[in-house]
Image: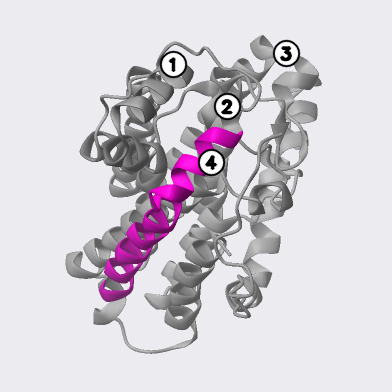
């Protein structure tokens, strides 16, 4: 394992999801019951494999966004429960597919589904969960909800393909990288929030504000995730340090270090990421270069920028418990870096 850095050692502030979790606790219990019910199948492997990843410690951030957004918009019915479960199914399906594409052996600190059941089963159960999510969309009965969530599913798939195209290509710039993370991560955050306004029959301006909140929150979330891949904090989060490096993924820390480095340093990145010619000590060298050029710290600063945009997007909503809880998520997503 390479040398890793902790860019926020000594910070006392520890934002959490506690306020949000407490606010939607009863709703989230109902969503969890729905998730278990709707992932059942007479094919025994399906609930076994799906249950493994569903129960593997995820925080349910995306369904909580749906629940809190609906509450903030004044909704007091039950449609948001099934739609929150739908959002989680979409997310879980993408995780199953991601781990196959990335050849990952760990997910949230546990053996990944593909490591236990194999790639074929993981892909097919991911397809099953996508199908279940569409059943839930149709059962809701709203064409607007169906449009939002089906579009999000398509864009997520596009983002995964874009990431395949940019992998191992050190010529990738920040705009192309941002296109990838907007599609593969931020789109589902945006959809999860926007449907909260739709079920509450709120005006378009509020739906668009929640969409803007979600997309910018999702960008900030992914930026910090990509920074953490080279950070000492990564092992605490149950992930292997340096996975992105080993897979040749071009993330913002690498983009910044590549552009700020000299030709010798760029040759190092080309060898390790483009040619996938990695030797003992290369991860140490990569982390050293990222630190030398401030790439990790600047990635977090980019996340703060998008977090600020997300915060402003909620400005049209009146103050209240739900709004405060959603604002907490911004700090939580960014402060994971420390």
Badge 4 local density, few (<14 within 10 Å), some, or many (20+)? many
Viewer-side residue, 179 vs 214: 179
Residue found at x 55% / y 49%: 228
Q: From which residue to which does the magenta span run?
A: 284-312
Residue 67 as seen in the image, left or right of residue 46: left
Viewer-side residue, 53 vs 276: 276
The label shown at residue 118 is 3
Q: Is residue 162 magenta?
A: no
User: Which image quarter holds the N terminus?
Assistant: top right
Badge 1 local density, few (<14 within 10 Å), some, or many (20+)? some
Viewer-side residue, 86 vs 20: 20
SS under mark 2: helix
The label shown at residue 271 is 1
The image shows residue 15 at horizontal and vertical percentages of 58, 75
Decide which of tag 3 and tag 1 comes sooner along the chain: 3
Residue found at x 72% / y 32%: 106
SS under mark 1: helix
Badge 2 local density, few (<14 within 10 Å), some, or many (20+)? some
């Amino acid at each position: 394992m390479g040398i890793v850095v902790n860019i926020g050692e000594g910070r006392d502030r520890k934002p959490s999801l506690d306020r949000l979790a407490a606010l939607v606790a009863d709703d989230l219990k109902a969503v969890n019951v729905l998730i278990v019910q709707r992932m059942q199948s007479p094919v025994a492997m399906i609930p076994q494999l799906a249950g493994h990843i569903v129960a593997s410690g995820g925080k349910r951030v995306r369904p909580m966004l749906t629940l809190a957004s609906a509450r903030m918009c004044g909704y007091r019915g039950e449609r948001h429960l099934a739609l929150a479960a739908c959002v989680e199914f979409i997310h879980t399906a993408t995780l199953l597919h991601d781990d196959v594409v990335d050849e990952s052996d760990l997910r949230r600190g546990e053996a990944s589904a593909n490591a236990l059941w194999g790639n074929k089963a993981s892909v097919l159960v991911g397809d099953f969960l996508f199908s279940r999510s569409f059943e839930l969309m149709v059962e809701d009965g709203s064409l607007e909800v169906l449009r939002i969530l089906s579009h999000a599913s398509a864009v997520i798939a596009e983002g995964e393909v874009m990431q395949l195209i940019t992998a191992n290509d050190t010529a990738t710039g920040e705009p192309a990288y941002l296109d990838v993370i907007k599609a593969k991560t931020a789109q589902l955050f945006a959809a999860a929030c926007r449907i909260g306004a739709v079920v509450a029959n709120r005006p378009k301006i509020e739906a668009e504000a929640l969409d803007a909140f979600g997309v910018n929150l999702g960008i900030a979330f992914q930026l910090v995730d990509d920074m953490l891949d080279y950070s000492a904090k990564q092992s605490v989060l149950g992930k292997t340090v340096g996975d992105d490096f080993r897979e040749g993924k071009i993330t913002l820390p690498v983009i910044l270090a590549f552009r700020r480095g000299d030709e010798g340093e760029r040759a190092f990145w080309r060898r390790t990421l483009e040619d996938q010619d990695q030797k003992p000590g290369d991860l140490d060298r990569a982390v050293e270069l990222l630190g030398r050029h401030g790439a990790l710290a600047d990635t977090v600063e980019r996340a703060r920028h998008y977090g600020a945009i997300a915060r402003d997007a909620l400005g049209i909503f009146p103050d209240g418990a739900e709004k405060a809880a959603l604002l907490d998520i911004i700090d939580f997503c960014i402060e994971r870096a420390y």
